Amino acid sequence: MTAISEKQRQALMTELQGLKRFCVSLTGNHADAEDLLQLTVERILDKGMPSDAHVAKWSFRVCRNIWLDELRSREVRYRYAQGEIAVNSETPTSSAPSERMLELERVEKLMHALPEEQRLALVLVAVEGRSYAEVADILDIPIGTVMSRVARARRALVEKSS
């Protein structure tokens, strides 16, 4: 692997908003998402990437791998600590949330109720606008599996929202 080129650096900057949304979908809260985004960008800048790598695919895959490592680490810490895990819950600061905010919160809850593999595939396809082939490459799974996960996620969202 080589250091990141200026062209790759610019492409990475273009991908940051989508990558941030992906981080939120993985972590479920904005604080962890910010940390994950920072770790992802640091890792890419420190370790570099192959000169022929597609920046978006590479960055999403690095992000996912860092998050999986974090989940494994948390599981180990939890097993050895044998204590309660403090759950972060974000509450809106506004005393009267708007209808749109309430709807967004409802959608967010529905999305996080999905199994992680379905949620990731759905976010990459429906929110990020990635093709099934790109998502298959990012998640390192067959394209048919992506299609199946997205279909099951959409069906679950429709069932839960009615």
Image (cartoon, rainbow, N blue to C red):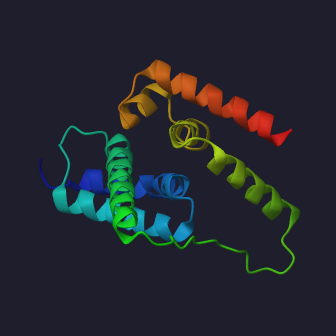
Q: Which sits in the foreground, 113 or 40?
A: 113
Across and down, in percent, residue 38 comes to 37, 67
> Residue at the location (87% across, 76% down)?
96
> Residue at the location (69% across, 54% down)?
108
Relative vertical location of residue 55 with respect to residue 70 in this rendering, above or below: above
Q: Which sits in the foreground, 16 or 68?
A: 68
Quadrant containing the C terminus in the rendered view:
top right
Relative vertical location of residue 73 with respect to residue 94 in this rendering, above or below: above
Q: Is residue 133 left or right of residue 109?
A: left
Residue 95, image quadrant: bottom right
Residue 69, image quadrant: bottom left
Outermost left residue: 2
Number of dots carrying numbers: 0
Q: Is residue 73 left or right of residue 100?
A: left
Q: Which sits in the foreground, 42 or 8?
A: 42
Outermost top residue: 144
> Residue at the location (25% across, 39% down)?
53
Across and down, in percent, residue 105 comes to 74, 59
Across and down, in percent, residue 67 comes to 38, 55
